[in-house]
Image (cartoon, rainbow, N blue to C red):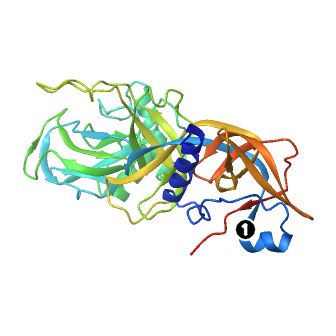
Amino acid sequence: MSRRRSRIVSAVTAAGVAGVAGVAGFVALDGPDRTSATPQEAAASAATAQVRRGDVAERRWVNGTLGYAGEHVVVAPAPGTLTRLPVVGSTVGRGGAVYDADGLPVILLYGGLPPWRSLQAGMTDGADVEQLESNLVQLGHGAGVTVDRHFTAATAQAVRRWQRATGLPVTGSVPLGQVVFAPEAVRVGGTELVPGAQVQPGGVVLRGTGGAPAVTFLLVPRQLPTAKAGDAVAVTLPDGTTRDGTIVSIGAVTVPTEAPGSNGGNNQPTATVTVRVDGAITGFMDQTQVQVAVTVAARTGVLAVPVTALNPVAGGTYQVVVLDGGGTHRIDVTTGLFDERTGLVEVDGPGLTEGQQVRVPRATS
């Protein structure tokens, strides 16, 4: 079997796995050209497809894991006795209690800076003040507050409104240990302590992830050297549906440590890739296995036909059978990219134009 013919078989097989409608059911088209057949006879023995102009992409399929994006560690800013922990698997958003210490909730606010001092009137200006004020506004308590680096009387009033609504002592200041910060909502993945334990400043209370579903996979740089953040991918979910996605980050390349006595054959450098999937995803278990199709080459505005429209001929080349008003005729074509997701192949040949009808095998039940 020639290399090109192998690509056709591979493309049809992969398209069937991905659930491409109308491709998996086709059978190989063999036999002599029916150039003398009438249109009615041709229609009886085969179906037709239109030559289209559009975009095609060649993809590489890799195994991925469906879980949640981001890694977050909640660190205690002040000492106390741990009196409550959230349920593993629950999500704590802005303004929610991420744990309780000494019987009072420690509130999660959004931001990149960890707390390191009390926030109160008379303090020096700082980015932590701006971070607090932004959260007060987002929580609906920021009337009269200007989000800046200065703790004003309006800021103190906003803090009082927030404390009253949250069930905290109403003081107008935020003592160290009353809030913690994370860049986003935290989905609790596991806890490091148990209720009754002493919380120490700088100690880890719990670990978690972001709340948004995401797919991760290990990238082998030599296999996908052009992959980068922003690239489009396709994700096949456990129920067989396929969703569009985007690579949002590629981690640092690491080399696994060789186990004693190993020959090092499987220690390829890899990087963890995170993919954001379009649309809501519900009803899945954390760490579910999925398939990710990563684009390795793409062409725009080219002529394309179904892979099953290709007819191998001597010499490893291909033809398509074009239907016209008086019957059929064959056109020699050269192939470009094979799009396994759509079941299309890029083609070019003398006389081949957009809108023509080409013969494809009739789908069988």
- Give percent across and percent down for residue 332: 78, 44
| Vertical arrangement, residue 365 with respect to residue 198, above or below | below
User: Percent from the top left, x then y, of residue 163?
Assistant: 35, 52
Q: Residue at x 36, y 29 (%)?
A: 270
Lateral position of residue 238 relative to residue 357, left or right = left
x, y percent for residue 191 = 18, 48
Q: Residue at x 27, y 51 (%)?
A: 188
Q: Is residue 279 above or below residue 303?
A: below
Name the residue at 13% across, 36% down: 200
Identity of the residue furthest to the right in this view: 325
Instruction: Relative to 204, say whether 355 is above or below.
Output: below
- Dot 1: what SS? strand
Label 1 crowd (10 A; few <14 / some 14-19 / many >=20): some
Residue type, numbered disc 1: Ala
User: Looking at the image, how many numbered discs can be counted on the residues?
Assistant: 1
The residue at which mark 1 appears reads as 47
Quadrant assignment for the C terminus: bottom right
Between 138 and 7, the one nearer to me in the picture: 7
